[in-house]
Amino acid sequence: MTPEQVLRVAVPVLLGIAGAVLLDRLCSARGLLPPGFRVPWRRALAGAVVAGLFALGVFAPLGSLGLSLEPDLTKITTPQLFALHFLMLGTMGAWFLLGWAGVRAQPQPVPVPLPEPIDPGEDFSPLPSPPSPLPPAPPPMTLSRQFAAQFGFRTPDVWREIGLGLALGLGAWVVVLLALMAVGGIVWALGGQDAVPQSPPPMVPFIAGLPVLVRVLISLSAGVVEESFFRGFLQPRIGILLSTAFFALAHLSYGQPFLLVGITLLSLIYSFFVKWRQNIWPAIAAHTLFDGVQLLVVVPSVVRLIQGTGAKTAAFLAGLL
């Protein structure tokens, strides 16, 4: 390997390790370290798993900056489209199990009630009445309930949150598309035509041309898995800004940095949904809706328009979408 190739591999790996260390430190500072991490090997192994995911799924696109890499879309199989989502689920599962599975709860000190003070004006009673019994300790939380609590799935009414997310997600979709068109128009008017993409990334029309069922599954997978990882797992532990930065970097592989404007806006909107509602269901619904509308309606329509007319405006819109 040439020094440049070594550097392109080393940068994502080192950044992945740094990201895992940062996650661990911020969890510790916020009192969010799982009880299992009192065991050093559990904590180290969880950090290694997270570092690997960060290197492959978040920082790997940085290693290809400046390279004109055209993916061979003919060799991509349907399972490969979900590979990163499987890695995210595996990382969350490993981190959670290392932190909670098989860990005995620390015994809590039982408070001893003090006897009532004696009134000096009354006769001293050598046998005070026994204190009232303490309420029984709540039963330990099951692993499934603990998993739901740790990653933001617990809420009194899931369907209400999903409905709210769909309504808010539709508004977010309109706002982000209008913002992208406005930014793109301003850049274009200022003479920065080269900065505005003239066509969508090759992967986007490729996915938009897949069978409808596959596109639906991709939208559902992106909504559930990406929101669980970036908003349910990372956001409470490293904050909105860092989790949004990681979300944007993970989408840098599209090969068009301009699209990061829309991706960052969406991530911030979903983050505030989660902060407001204190669960990730609205963000899951909004994210799924956005991807579904894009892959099932918008991108296929614009691509057909380009192929049918070759319109420059259509190509500009496709680059933004």
Image (spheres, grey):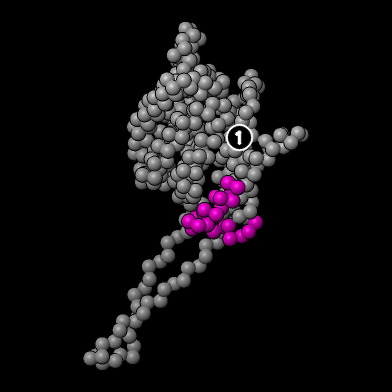
* SS type, badge 1: helix
**Depth check: 305 or 312 in front?**
312
Give the percent coordinates (x, y) of residue 291: 46, 28
Q: Is residue 194 left or right of residue 185?
A: right
- Disc 1 target residue: 62
Residue 232 visible in the snapshot: no
Q: Which residues are magenta?
A: 18-41
Q: Please say whether residue 40 is one of the residues in the magenta stretch.
A: yes
Considering the image in quadrants, where does the N terminus appear?
A: top right
Amino acid carrying mark 1 in the image: Leu
Q: Is residue 117 left or right of residue 26?
A: left
**Depth check: 124 or 268 in front?**
268
How many numbered badges does the structure rendering display?
1
Give the percent coordinates (x, y) of residue 161: 36, 39
**Which residue is outermost to the front?**
190
User: What residue is at 46 percent from the left and 43 percent from the top?
Assistant: 241
On screen, residue 36 above or below 60: below
On screen, residue 173 above or below 114: above
Give the percent coordinates (x, y) of residue 80: 61, 29
Q: Please say whether residue 310 is one of the residues in the magenta stretch.
A: no
